Amino acid sequence: MRRLKVALATVVLGALGLSGCGGTNNALATKQQQVEYYRIFDLKTNAGRQVIAKAATDGLGQNTGTINTAMPIPASAEPPEKPGRFKVVNPLAGSRLGMLAAAGGGLGMKMADCDGAVWTGNAIRKVSNSNSLNLWACLYPYKGGYHLDMYATFTKVEGGLAEISRQMAYAAVGTPEEWTEKTFTDVIRQIHDQTYADITYLEGYPDPGPLPWHDQGSRAAAGVPVKQGQ
């Protein structure tokens, strides 16, 4: 409640502090920003892909409403020397819709291509006052274990007449960025808890950020036992 009051006061004071028509117009202008996230983790475990897939699906289910998963047949009976890696693709690239999206300054309809993965997952969460969060997960085996690649994208809305109510909602339930971090964290935590995997964070963008405020003090906020890659 205190955070909610502070957020509301900040927005109101900011609006009162505007000077001139330019500042007022900027505050009332509705802005949309397309945001991309990705994370790559190394998993050292003797667990099979079915066990890891179940754990990852359980993690996705804690924060998303729609989950679609698949378990493709591996191309080879033996895991490769090096793991695969996801690719970001735009299925509308080169089409009329794709050109219109690019002309409007957007990122287009980007998604993860998990070619070569032995398990894939796509989850959707309706983020308050923004478009849906779309998250893809790709599990790649290799002789040393597995890599789990996760890619997420959402459109963040700012400004406009709804900004005050939007900030109130963020103060109550967390921002889209915080919920994206929570989803990543819950997937990794479920994999660790169900497989006892030795997990290393290899790379990602942007740097890991905070979780929603109501998660602070919980097991999730305490952090998953994840090492930082060199």
Image (cartoon, rainbow, N blue to C red):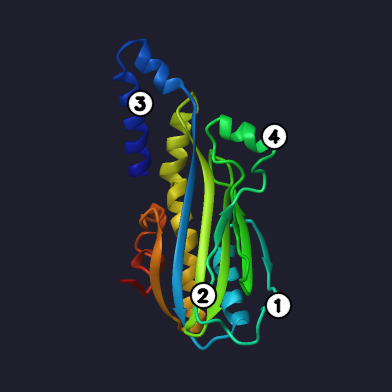
Label 4 to label 2, Cα distance in Å?
35 Å
Asked if the residues shown at circle 4 and circle 3 are in contact, with their CB atoms under 8 angstroms apart, the answer is: no
- Of 68 and 103, the residue lying toward us: 103
Q: Is label 2 in a helix, a strand or a loop?
A: loop
* Amino acid type at image mark 4: Arg
> Does residue 193 appear in this view?
yes
Give how far across and how far down residue 124 sits, in percent: 61, 54
Badge number at residue 12: 3
Residue 51: where, in percent of width, then height?
59, 81
Please state, as top left, top right, bottom left or bottom right, where the N terminus lies in the image: top left
Decide: few, some or many residues near mark 1? Use Cα within 10 Å; few <14, some 14-19, many ≥20. few
Residue type marked 3: Val
Q: Is residue 182 left or right of residue 1?
A: right
Which sits earlier in the primary sequence, circle 4 or circle 1?
A: 1
What is the spatial separation of the Cα atoms under label 4 and label 3, in whole angstroms? 42 Å
Say the numbered circle drawn on residue 83.
2
Q: Can see residue 173?
A: no
The amino acid type of the residue labelled 2 equals: Pro
Secondary structure of residue under mark 4:
helix
Between the C-alphas of marks 1 and 2, the distance is: 16 Å
**Which mark is nearer the camera, 4 or 1?**
4
Task: Note whether 91 is above or below 100 in the view shown.
Answer: below
- The dot on residue 73 is 1
